[in-house]
Structure formats: C-alpha cells, structure tokens
Image (tube, helix red, strand yellow):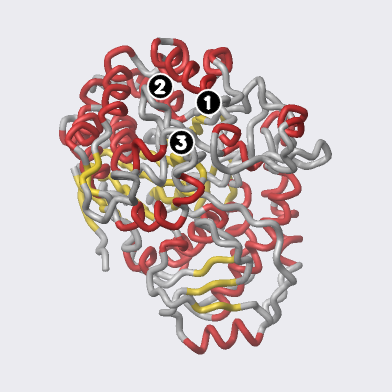
Amino acid sequence: MSETVVGEKGMVVAPHWAAAEAGAEILRAGGNALEAMIATAATIAVVYPHMNGIGGDGFWLVREPGRPPRYIKGCGSAGSKATIAAYRAKGYDHIPTRGPDAALTVAGAVSGWELAFELSKSLGGRIERTTLLENAIGHARAGTAVTRSQTRLTREHLAALKAAPGFADFFLVDGEVPEVGTILRQERFADTLDQLAHAGFDDFYRGDIAVTIADDLERIGSPVTRDDLAKHQARFRPPLSVRLTDVELFNAPPPTQGVASLIILGVFERLGVQRGESFEHVHGLVEATKRAFLIRDAHVTDPEIAGDLSMHLSNAVLDREAGHVDMRRAAPWPQVAKKGDTVWLGAIDANGMAVSYIQSIFWEFGSGVVLPRTGITWQNRGSSFSLDHRARNPLHPGRKPFHTLNPAMASFDDGRFMSYGTMGGEGQPQTQAAVFTRYARFGMDLAEAIAAPRWLLGRSWGSDHTNLRLENRFDPDVVNALQRAGHDVEVLDASHADLMGHAGALVRRKDGRIFGASDPRSDGAAVPA
C-alpha cells in the first residue's frame, strides 16, 4: 500500500519511480515545475514505452502562483493523405487499430514540451534542455527493466503488435515477449532524445528529425507527411472550469473528454451524498458518469467544430442533469466506450507552480509501428475517427481526433491546490471523480483515496465489457445494493486491477506543505525534491 508523501521543496508524481525521480532531480537543481515535468515526461517515455511516448500527444494544465491555470494543447491532426476515400479504397469499413494505416495523426507531445519550455524560460527557468533530457537519454542507453504491465500487455496483444513495422525489432527479444526484469535498451531512441536536447524540440517538426520521421512514415505507407509535421504547433488555450461550493475545478477542453470529468463532479455535488464508500457514493458517481458521457458523445469533437462547451457546465445544465439521476435505480446502459493507454504526471514546485500533464499513444504501444531510424513508437489516436461522413468524428485531413486524455486541477477556497489525474481511457473521468470525492468530500487521506477500491463503467485496456466492474475489496453490502438498483455488476478477481488505471495526485496547502501519492496499481512514486 502506498503512503502519502509530504514535502515542502516540491514534489513529482509519476506511474514509474524513475520518471518521478528524474523530475525531482530537476527540482533539487533549482528547476521549476514545468522543467521538472519535461524531464519526467521524457523519462516516462523511455521506461514505460507501452503506455506513452513522443510519438503521441500531450495535454498540460499549468498553474502559476496567484493565476488561474493555463492549458497547453499538444495534440496532432490527421495527416493530409488521411481521407475517407483513401481508406475505403483499401477496403476498410473502419480505421485499423494497428500498423501504418493506424499511424495517421501527427504526434503533438514534443510540441507541448516546446511550449512548456518557452513558458518556463519566460518565467525565469534556467535549466537547459540537455539537463532536462539527460536522465531519459541515460535510461535509454543503459537500458531499463521491463515492468510487469509491459510484459503482460505485450503478450496479450502480441499477434497484432508483432505484425506492425519495427515492433519486433525494438520490443521483442529474439522474437519473444521480454520477461519481467529483462533489461531493454533503446539506443535509437536515445539518439533521438539527444538530438532534441541539442537541436531543440522544434527539430521534431521542422528539422533533421522531422525529415527522418517523414521518410520512415512514407516508407511504411502512413498518411502523415513532412508537410503535416511542419504545419503542426502546440497552442495555449483557456481550460474549462466549473465552480462547486468551495472549490473551482479545471480540465481540458475539446478534443478531450475533460468536459465529462467536470460534469460528473458538478452533477454529483447536487445529489446530496453524505457518506463516502456507501452505495449512494458509488451509485451517484456512476449515474453522473452516464449523464456526462451522453453530453460528451454528442458534443466532443475537433475543437474548431465543437466550439465552446462551457455552456454544459452552467448551473442550469448541471441542475437539469442531476434531476435525471434516480438515486434508487440505475439508468439503462451501455453507450459506446472508448479505450486507451496513457500516463498522468504531476509536479508542484516550492514556489507553488503546479502542473497536471497527460501523455499518451492511445492503445498499448499505439499503432505498434516503431520508426527504425528514430526508435519512436507512433500513436494510433486516429483510430477514433469514423469512416462515416455523418459521424460525430469523421476522418478528414487536418482534423483532430477525439481524446480520452484530460488532466485535472482543483483550486480550493481555503488555499489548497490539487493536481491530479489518471490513465485508463473511459475510466479517466470516473477515477478522477473517485479520487477527488474521497479526498475533498469525504476526508480520506490522499494515498488512501487513490488506493481504495475502484470501479469502471465501460471499457479500458482493450476490454469489450460495458458493464460496471468492481475491484473485489468493496463492501459486499455495497455490491449487493448496486445489483438491487439494477446495475450490471461484475466483481473482478483482482484487488488492485490495472484496468482501473494508474492515478496520482498532489496537494499544496496554504502553508506550503505538499502532499503527494501514486497508485499502488502502477510502478510509480511520489518523490519530494
């Protein structure tokens, strides 16, 4: 069982201890939370390659002391050759999830690093890129031990992954799944990170690395071109927010499902639940999730099309949605579920700057494509597009796909500030709601709030289930009450199931003390500076 860690000079949380330590080292060297997060993000891309990488996307919430959070959108668009006609001509009824045709969107994560680095410099940051990426480069060259989840997921999805160009060369050992503890070296990836450290993050899009990436993508038949890379830029955008009685919550706007995470908590606030870990607590959040997902699925798409979704966070809409919740009976379900694999990372420095960051390649190992000259694993985020022109998210060059990713923050009236999040696809808003309500509404210790038994309505980690699954540590009386209310309940054999996501959280109090905790379901840690 993980414990809440307390510090005053800053702290980093990540789902792998090496990444958290890399960020904490930057804080100890006088770096700020933005610089620490870049170091953490680079290192997690090396040591947790099945969950994320620089061939994927990233979303940031950044809070400077005394200012509302800012949002950095580091997500790519569909390539210029990614058209419905082109995929139909290849005989597809839907976009494939693995291989070159799944590698159809620009990777935006590094552009987010670049914008965060520029912001850091403008705020007085002095740590150079070479230092920020030093840890990641070192781990890639020396090799890192394969984790339990990497071995399991590689084995479960081997048939699809090994057929993708480059995967076997980089992530199998003599054609076999590497066992837990096997030292995996990533020399090509180390060279790529070293080039970024010296040439700058922009090199990924408009420099030598961009040329190499584009050549490799063209060679395997991906619809992403060099011009697509050159046109890409990360952007600052206002975050979405919702006001509760004693706290303001922040999350990411489209193309992410951040609006759903905020709706869940806004609706739950109106249900009047008084006791945590009760039937009312779990049932209320599950039913609020259903209402939120209906709005999400109707409105979240490319941000240029979706527009401003803040209207769905108004008191009138949240009151209406809460009115649809029956606290005695479960509403009919399922809806279409989303899946995905991701990492959430958090950092708070001694001055109170805070970061909540999500980095992802979508499914485990993304498209499975590993570019031979850079060692970059490319995401399959574009598989969430539809080949139906009438769909909410139809494939179109330059359009951004739907994202499950959504980093979260909370600013309390008593001076506390919370940075929190999780991986887990469809489960992200649900786990955020569980962690937040346990900590902020029912008084749980931060580590206890993360470790406590969780539930999942819908799909994550490749499962096709759409029922309500519970870890086996729930009170049997709660389980029975949920079943009586009409929930399609499945109690898992696992006490700490991976499919429930890998969560983390940091809280800075008004007195400057920082509390952090990572998920016992992960290989992570909360590391103080």
Disc 1, SS: helix
Q: In which quarter of the image is residue 152?
A: bottom left
Query: Who comes first in sequence, dot 2 or dot 1?
Result: 2
Q: Where is residue 518 in the image (x, y as percent from the top left)?
A: 32, 56
Q: In which quarter of the image is the N terminus?
A: bottom left
User: Residue at left 25%, top 29%?
Assistant: 187
Considering depth in this image, is 132 or 516 the residue closer to the camera? 132
Residue position for label 3:
60
Q: Where is residue 514 in the image (x, y as percent from the top left)?
A: 27, 50
Q: Could you tell whether 151 is left or right of 115 in the image?
A: left
User: Residue at left 42%, top 51%?
Assistant: 420
Query: Is residue 196 visible to us here?
Result: yes
How far separated are the C-alphas under marks 3 and 2? 12 Å
Residue position for label 2:
114
Q: How many labels does the image show?
A: 3
Q: In this view, does 371 lie above or below 509?
A: above
Q: In which quarter of the image is the C terminus?
A: top left
How far separated are the C-alphas under marks 1 and 3? 31 Å
- Pointer 1 with pointer 3, Cβ within 8 A: no
Disc 3, SS: strand
Q: In which quarter of the image is residue 392?
A: top right
How far separated are the C-alphas under marks 2 and 1? 28 Å
Query: Is residue 68 visible to us here?
Result: no
Q: Could you tell whether 477 is left or right of 496 in the image?
A: right
Q: Could you tell whether 110 is left or right of 317 in the image?
A: left
Q: In this view, does 431 lie above or below 198?
A: below
Q: Is residue 470 above or below residue 162?
A: below
Q: Where is residue 136 in the image (x, y as percent from the top left)?
A: 25, 33
Q: What residue type is labelled 1?
A: Ile
Residue position for label 1:
220
Query: Who comes first in sequence, dot 1 or dot 3?
Result: 3
Q: Which amino acid does label 3 sit on?
A: Trp
